[in-house]
Amino acid sequence: MLKTIILIMFLAIVSAFSGRTLMLLSGIFSKKDTDMFSSFSAGSLLVIVISFVSHFLTVLGDGLVSTEKRYSGMLMVAAMTVGYFAFVILTVIRGKKEKEKKEKEKVKASAFLFFLIAAVLSVACFLTVVRGERINSAGDETLETVVTFLNGSPMYTVDPLTGSSYAEGLPSRYKILCLSGFYSVLCEAFGSAPASLVRSIMPGFWFVSGLFAMIALSGALFKGAKDELLKRSVFVSAAVLFIFAADLSSYAQGFLILSAMWTGAAVRAWVLIPFMLYCLFDRRYILALLPVFCEAFICRTQYGIGFCACIYAGYALFMFILKRRQKCSEAS
């Protein structure tokens, strides 16, 4: 139990701290504000990047979990050290930004009511995910793959379902997907049971990261608007209700969020896409590329081109057309 608490604290601290630094870097010239929600989501994506690098190096080498644990440990320590000094330097450079004094808008009863609804729905959804009440692992081999890695065999040499060696090697595109290796490293480092980590701890972590991304996205959409709290609460409530509604059918896009939040497809739908939309709407265009790469690291996309890349390209095309129309209208 103690090791599980330490594991959760480790994930939370690394994500929050490294993400805060990343958000400060992305807004260093525009001096954009950062909050704990966007920082945590950004940090969770940075964890994916670190996991991919360590997993990729391991696959190129001996393919042992102990090796990936060593790489991950070094990269995590390096990221935390660099992040600490960068955080201090950026804080000094930015200085204390004086916030304009403005009258506090009186919170209406309807806004407070929807805030409570959003909070209750979020907690209920989180508990459902963590307790594994609706697990659906059909066609998924993540847990079996993690167990196989922990048994000491080099990665991707033994079939996790049969326990026998592969007759033919797996494609490199499949081998570089890093979530199974990342989960194996956490089990090895903190002594967590594979089933508990894969289907309880990590789904909870990814759900919180996605929820925070949704809250950050609501801030980008409705910041400064009248009845801001009401609109943001309704937005988050609708997002969580979408999860419950999608769980009714395996054909729905959000089905995996409640039933298999440990998978790359669920992380893409609930974490990567909302965070990327937040970055785009907040004009953090370089940081918005991070989910594009993360999707390639955790999902079986076609040569790395996935949903995030298409959304980014579509947004860029739309903004280009919009600016062209504006210039044409101004010229006429």
Image (cartoon, helix red, strand yellow):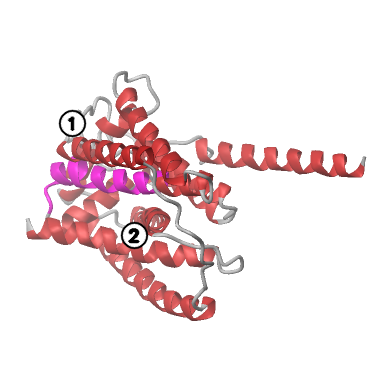
Task: Choose between 188 and 253: the one closer to the eye.
Answer: 253
- Asked whether residue 184 is drawn in magenta, I would say no
Q: Which quadrant, please, contains the N terminus?
A: bottom left
Q: The disc labelled 1 sits on which kind of residue?
A: Thr
Name the magenta segment's main secondary structure: helix
The residues bearing labels 1 and 2 have C-alpha atoms spaced at a distance of 36 Å
Task: Choose between 231 and 315: the one closer to the eye.
Answer: 231
Q: The disc labelled 2 sits on which kind of residue?
A: Ser
Q: Given this view, does label 1 or label 2 mark the residue nearer the observer?
A: 2
Q: Is residue 316 rendered to the left or right of residue 328?
A: left
- Image disc number at residue 15: 2
Q: Quadrant of residue 135?
A: top left
Task: Choose between 287 and 188: the one closer to the eye.
Answer: 287
Q: Which quadrant, please, contains the C terminus?
A: top right
Rendered position, 51 above or below 243: below
Residue numbers of the magenta segment: 192-214
Q: Earlier in the sequence, mark 1 or mark 2?
A: 2
Q: Position of residue 13 (x, y in %)?
A: 28, 64
Q: Is residue 190 visible?
A: yes
Residue drawn where x is 75% and y is 38% of the image: 321
- Secondary structure under tag 2 reads helix
- Image disc number at residue 162: 1
Q: Quadrant of residue 329?
A: top right
Q: Residues within 10 Å of mark 1 (few under 14, many from 20)?
A: few
Residue drawn where x is 16% and y is 31% of the image: 133
- Secondary structure under tag 1 reads loop
Q: Position of residue 233 (x, y in %)?
A: 39, 40
Residue drawn where x is 38% and y is 65% of the image: 18
Residue drawn where x is 53% and y is 76% of the image: 94
Rendered position, 67 above or below 217: below
Q: Position of residue 311 (x, y in %)?
A: 57, 37
